[in-house]
Structure formats: C-alpha cells, structure tokens
Amino acid sequence: QSALTQPASVSGSPGQSITISCTGTSSDVGGYNYVSWYQQHPGKAPKLMIYEVSNRPSGVPDRFSGSKSGNTASLTISGLQAEDEADYYCSSYTSSSIGVFGGGTKLTVL
Amino acid sequence: QVQLQESGPGLVKPSQTLSLTCTVSGGSISSGSYYWSWIRQPAGKGLEWIGRIYTSGSTNYNPSLKSRVTISVDTSKNQFSLKLSSVTAADTAVYYCAGWELAYYFDYWGQGTLVTVSS
C-alpha cells in the first residue's frame, strides 16, 4: 500500500488561507469517505482535525475544513494563525481493510 | 475520556523482537467501539500505519510489515500489545498506540514511545 501524496510544504501569512492536497487512488481516497486529517506539533502526538472527509471534532476551530473530489482530498485552513504552524497528515481507509497515511505537509506561517 | 499509554523497552538489539504494550484507561477495551492500532514515526519522517486489532481478535497488518508483526489484546488487563520481530535500525521510531474509530479515524492517541534499535 503506497503512501498518499501530499506536498512537502506549504506556507501562508497570518489571516490568509491555505489548502493542502492529499492524492490517492480509487482503492483508498476515491473509494471511501473515510479520509481524516491530523495536526502534529514537534514532539507531540498527532491530533485529529477532520474526519470522514469534512467533519470537525468538537473543539477544532471552524477555520479548518475538509473536502474531497475524486481521488484527491483537501484540507483548507482559513484565517491562518501562528499556532497553526505544524505538520499535517492525511489518512484514508483502504480496500485492503488497512489504513494509509500521507507523507505529511509542513505548514509554515510567515 | 479514553487515555492510552505505551510502555516497553526503549532499546532493542538488532535481530531481536520489539515488544510494546498499550494500556487503555477511561474506557473498556472490549467496548467494541474501536480498532486498537499501532502507528510509528521515524525521526523527521512521516507516520506509518502498522496494524490493528478488534476485540474479537481479528487483525489487519501493513503488508510491508506483515511477516514480522503480531498485535494481540488482553481484555483482562485492558491492554493490547505489539511485537515486531527481526528488527533492524530501520525500525527505530516513535511508536504510538491509538484508537481507530469504526469510521476509520484516530481520535485517541498515546503520547508515543521512542524505540531505538542498536547494539
């Protein structure tokens, strides 16, 4: 099972919006609405930000949103804040009944 | 609130077996609400899904690790475990245990434990 494809890095200024893409195949991202997104600060465990493509857990700001089109899922962060600087990972369920992560994207807030 | 805590040796010799345990508190491991999972992250690299177990004992493993991995559950202790055999330096990583919701997202994570493979 190959890792999902994410850009290595993205950046934006405070207040701006950024989008991180996550590309898979019809056997994972495209085949199921089971895409989730995680935020990871250095030295910390990942934190769930989005589940089932576009749902936000309680406590996650509505600046974070998710979507999917075909084999590509996206995480959009609007109104960027300094504390959003972190690594972001997408994940999907797969037709092999296992999970797969993306390679991760480092978000820099300029 | 479910909490998870990894435990086990921080140093394992090459060719030996890595063994970690995850203790679940704040809920029953037998609740049937989660697939109990292991994930790892080499330093400076991304997350890798290792495998999962359901309370029935059914398991699924990452094909790249399948020949070396065993995940088991001990409901009497509210714990689940990871064994990875024939380890090499490439298995050096932070290992996380996590609860994978039945809708396939991880909402509970342990703090992670660093395992170094070295002689």
Image (spheres, coloured by chain):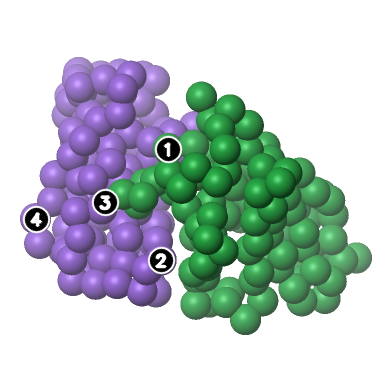
Asked if the residues shown at circle 4 and circle 3 are in contact, with their CB atoms under 8 angstroms apart, the answer is no
Q: Position of residue A50 (x, y in %)?
A: 28, 37
Q: Which chain is green?
A: B
Q: Which chain is purple?
A: A
Label 2 to label 1: alpha-carbon separation: 16 Å
Please name the residue shown 55% across and 46% down the image.
Answer: B30
Q: Earlier in the sequence, mark 4 or mark 3?
A: 3
Query: Is disc 2 in the same subunit as disc 4?
Result: yes
Asked if the residues shown at circle 2 and circle 3 are in contact, with their CB atoms under 8 angstroms apart, the answer is no
Residue indicated by mark 4 = A69
Q: Position of residue B24 (x, y in %)?
A: 63, 38
Residue indicated by mark 1 = B107
Using the image, determine if residue B65 lies above or below residue B50. below
* Res A87 visible: no
Left or right placement of residue A96 versus residue B58 in this view = left
Q: Position of residue B80 (x, y in %)?
A: 66, 52
Q: Secondary structure at mark 1?
A: strand
Label 4 to label 3: alpha-carbon separation: 12 Å
